[in-house]
Image (cartoon, rainbow, N blue to C red):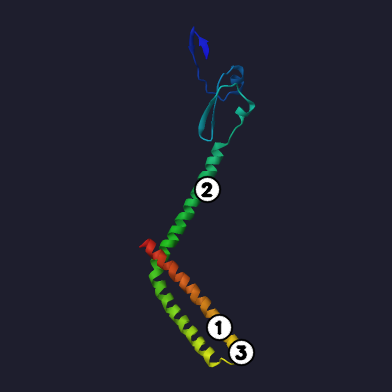
Amino acid sequence: MSTWGGKDGSIVVISHDRSFCEQVDFTHVGVVKDGSFILEERSLLESDWETYNLSSEKSATSVSNEQNSAVDKQEETRLRKLAFNAPKRIKKLTSMIEKVEESIEEIDNDMVTYGTDLDMLKDLMAKKEVEETKLEEYMIEWEELETLLAEYS
């Protein structure tokens, strides 16, 4: 506290003028860091003059948020379009799944028929693996579309 006119009192000075601040003998220094105001009982330090380019941080954050927002909107649009077209695609997938299941059944029957021909069995197993992979992919897509429909219906 300083005395001014015979009474105790305080003066609050907010300044970015370094030469002015260095001429005043401050007893307390307030600093804003990370969104908080910190009041300390001390004189000025060299570190009090560090500058932060808040405008570029804000603009970078703002641009980043705008980009994320645009990406989110694009993704939302894509998902809504998928959901809109999902019933037609599910119908097509159901047909494709049935055909693959029939193909696998035929391969299984052929494996029984050619059970003693090892070369033929190897070929049939390779074909069956291809068909089972297709079936798995179709089922995954079908499940994803069902989930999407439930979410956007």
Q: Determine whether, in the image, residue 33 is placed left or right of residue 95.
A: right
Of label 2 and label 3, which has the lower sequence position?
2
User: Closer to the observer: label 3 or label 1?
Assistant: 3
Q: Residues within 10 Å of mark 1 (few under 14, many from 20)?
A: some
Q: Which residue is mark 1?
A: 127
User: Which label sits on residue 74?
Assistant: none
Q: Determine whether, in the image, residue 47 is placed left or right of residue 58.
A: right
Which element carries disc 1, helix, strand or loop?
helix
The kind of residue on which mark 3 rests is Leu
User: Closer to the observer: label 2 or label 1?
Assistant: 1
Q: Residue furthest right?
A: 46
Image location of residue 37, percent across then percent down:
51, 29
The kind of residue on which mark 2 rests is Ser
Discs 3, 1 touching: Cβ within 8 Å: no
Q: Determine whether, in the image, residue 126 is placed left or right of residue 148.
A: right
Residue at position x 46%, y 84% in the image: 102
Q: Which residue is mark 3?
A: 118
Q: Residues within 10 Å of mark 3 (few under 14, many from 20)?
A: few
Label 3 to label 1: alpha-carbon separation: 14 Å
User: Which label sits on residue 64?
Assistant: 2
Which element carries disc 3, helix, strand or loop?
helix
Of label 3 and label 1, which has the lower sequence position?
3
Using the image as rendered, state which of residue 71 and residue 101 is in the foreground. 101
In which image quadrant can residue 51 be found? top right
Image location of residue 118, percent across then percent down:
61, 89
The kind of residue on which mark 1 rests is Lys
Image vertical order of residue 151 relative to residue 97, above or below: above
Using the image as rendered, state which of residue 17 and residue 128 is in the foreground. 128
Residue at position x 47%, y 53% in the image: 70
Residue at position x 52%, y 46% in the image: 63
